[in-house]
Amino acid sequence: MKISRRQFTAGTLAAGAAAAFGALPSRSAFAQGSKPTIAFFVKNVTNPFWKACRVGAEKAAKELGVNMEVVAPTKPDNIEEQTRLVEDWIVKKPDAFAFVPVDYKALVPSIQKANQAGIPIVMYCNDMTDVDKVTFVGSDDEVFEYEISKYLFNAMGGKGKVVHIDGVPAAFTAQLRKKGFERAVKEFPGIEVLASQPGQYRRLPASQVFENLMQRFPQIDAVVSANDDMAVGIVEALHAAGRSGQTKVVGIDGIPDAIQAIADGKMFATADYSGHDQGYLAMQAAVRHLRGEKVPKQILLPVIIIDKENAGKVARTPEERSAPSWDKVVGKA
């Protein structure tokens, strides 16, 4: 069921230093009658969320007839490696970047170099400031964790002992999601937060952190996890400790493992962050910009809660998902 929707806005944006919004870049492969190449960046190749982003982008690239190169650090979320990759791809001069930063501050100088090189940037999932970009495709992270936390707290009758598992503390998404959790807690005085610790957005670290928390706290009524990969690790830790069914676990992303765990009654709910749709729309936005079409400066997707009631109706792999309609999403600007 749909919980909220942010309206999309259109505006004007400089492409490079002086080109007007929506103007066809002079270096565009489309303008030269050749097949464009778009570098599609992900943070790592271990988290299923980034696989979903890649699959969605690949669908769009195939439909639109463009070359897509996946660019990922070999070490998950590694700032230094992503910085080198950006600078390597500036030298290769692709027609555009579809980019997500490992760190939204540390990567600013590198993306500014891409701006200076005249490479159009479509930002997705995590936004950045102090850089020129065609658009940002994503969701409101604070709203996502606020909505999933409220959904959980209401199901708990507004009271109980809760643990929060954070993502990568330096990541802007993690900071916003934690704010959403804290905002929801303020609205439920009967909710007691036992602890909030980072799980690095990865399954094994989150599982290990939660194992330690279970030793400290004999009663944990619920867990709010900043993403699904960590939530699945928490569910596995609960099962290993013989505490399955005693703790409600929620996450964010809507990855296949989480949806399956919800359908099996092992996990309570998730908010569908839809990496698949973000990847697809980011690639669409890049290609449309290269064709000289207008692109909104921001495209935000709605919050959709997945629970046991609708888990069986949701496609469980990125490959099975239907591509979002550009006209239905962006056409409502």
Image (tube, rainbow, N blue to C red):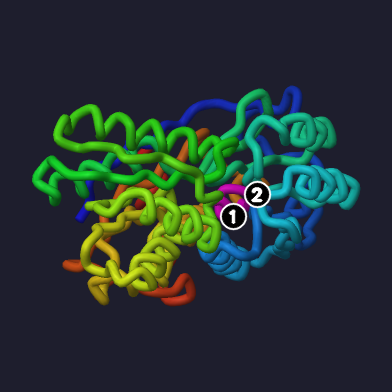
Say if 106 sits above or below 71 in the image: above
Which one is nearer the viewer's eye here, 158 or 287? Answer: 158
Q: Residues within 10 Å of mark 1 (few under 14, many from 20)?
A: many
Dominant SS in magenta: helix
Q: Position of residue 241 (x, y in %)?
A: 36, 69
Q: Quadrant of residue 262?
A: bottom left
Name the residue nearer the viewer: 193 or 61. Answer: 193
Q: Residue at x 50, y 44 (%)?
A: 198
In the image, the segment drawn in magenta is 282-287
Identify the residue at horizontal 20%, vertical 37% (top origin): 191
Local packing at callout 2 (Cα closer than 10 Å; few below 14, some 14-19, many 20+) is: many
- Report the number of discs: 2
Q: Earlier in the sequence, mark 1 or mark 2?
A: 2
Residue furthest out toward the right: 91
Picture residue at 14% right of the left edge, 35% below the top:
190
Q: Position of residue 167 (x, y in %)?
A: 50, 46
Residue matched to label 1 = 283
What residue sits 51% from the left and 50% below the top? 199
User: As shown in the figure, which amino acid type bears the numbered disc 2?
Assistant: Ala
Amino acid, disc 1: Met
Q: Secondary structure at mark 2?
A: strand
115 is higher (above) or lower (below) than 217: above
Label 1 – label 2 distance at C-alpha: 7 Å
Q: Is residue 150 left or right of residue 78?
A: left
Whether 283 is among the magenta residues is yes
Q: Is residue 260 left or right of residue 121?
A: left
Vertical placement of 294 versus 109: above or below? Answer: below
For the residues labelled 1 and 2, say whether their Cβ atoms are less than 8 Å apart: yes
**92 or 11, nearer to the observer:** 92
State the residue position of label 2.
Answer: 98
